[in-house]
Amino acid sequence: MDFFKSQESLTAAEWILRSVVGFIFLIFAAKMMGQRSISQLRFLDFIIALTLGNIIAHPLSDEHLGLKGSMITTVSLVVLYIAAIWLSLKIPLLKQFFDPPAIALIRDGKLNYRNLSKAKLPIEFLYAELRKSNVEDISKVAYAAWEPGGTLSVFVNTAFQPVTPADLKLPAQPFNLTKPIIADGHMEHALLHEIGKDSKWLETQIRPHALKQVILATVDSNLTVQVHAVREA
């Protein structure tokens, strides 16, 4: 366990052991923080990500620094992060500080330039985000807001929205969820169990293809299997 402590020099094996321990430790730290810190970086998430990355990086690249101190500091920061998230759910003022409300940038086709400056966004960036939402004209936007996670939410006026079967009072097909059941020749046993089928049933559904030939196959809510890609013989 000498690789944990500060050393004048480390062998190649000790550097590898440090990397393995640091990698596994960060996995557990990220697991403790939850999926919110992974899905999007808000204010508190951004701060913790910068801090943790800086703390754990130094002992992984400097033999004169031990891992123990960095790991204790990291655990302390993760606990503080979880406590801050919990307190923000209980105390409205903290919630508003850590997770500020969305900033309205467009209402009824009119740009709120003051809020655009508050969000520190140039107009060119706003139009780029609108294009990502397939909106080419700001006058078509009923409401657009800059979210704390760094994304733009766009709602188009009803007059410019696509017509749906409900608008025309037409019957619509029920929602049909498609999931991958074979990927790179490996079947998803958990999904097979979920739909109450076995491997023999699946092999029958993908004929004339063999299981190892199939790159991607999906199954829908009606238990219809479709083979989308196969390896060439």
Image (spheres, rainbow, N blue to C red):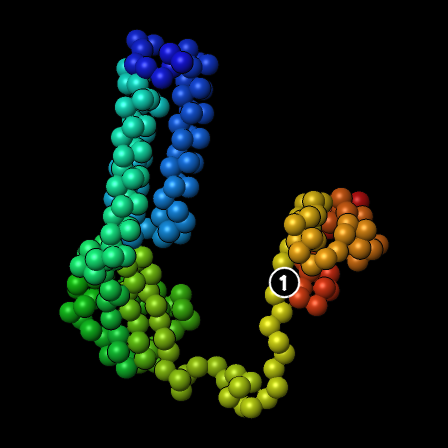
Whether 28 is drawn above or below 194: the answer is above
The correct choice, above or below, for 143 with respect to 202 in the image is: below
Q: In the image, is 127 to the left or to the right of 233? A: left
In the rendered image, residue 161, in percent from the top left (x then y), is placed at: 44, 81
Q: Could you tell me which residue is drawn at 46 percent across and 14 percent down?
A: 13
**Residue at the image point whose x is 42% and y is 71% from the top:** 134
Q: Which residue is mark 1?
A: 178
223 lies left or right of 165: right
Examine the rendered structure and indicate whether residue 54 appears above or below residue 31.
above
The picture quadrant where one finds residue 28 is top left
The spot of residue 8 in percent (x, y) is 30, 8
Badge 1 amino acid: Thr
Residue, x 61% and y 86% (percent of image)?
171
> Where does the N terminus fall, quadrant-wise?
top left
Q: Quadrant of the C terminus?
A: top right
Residues 115 and 79: in front is 79
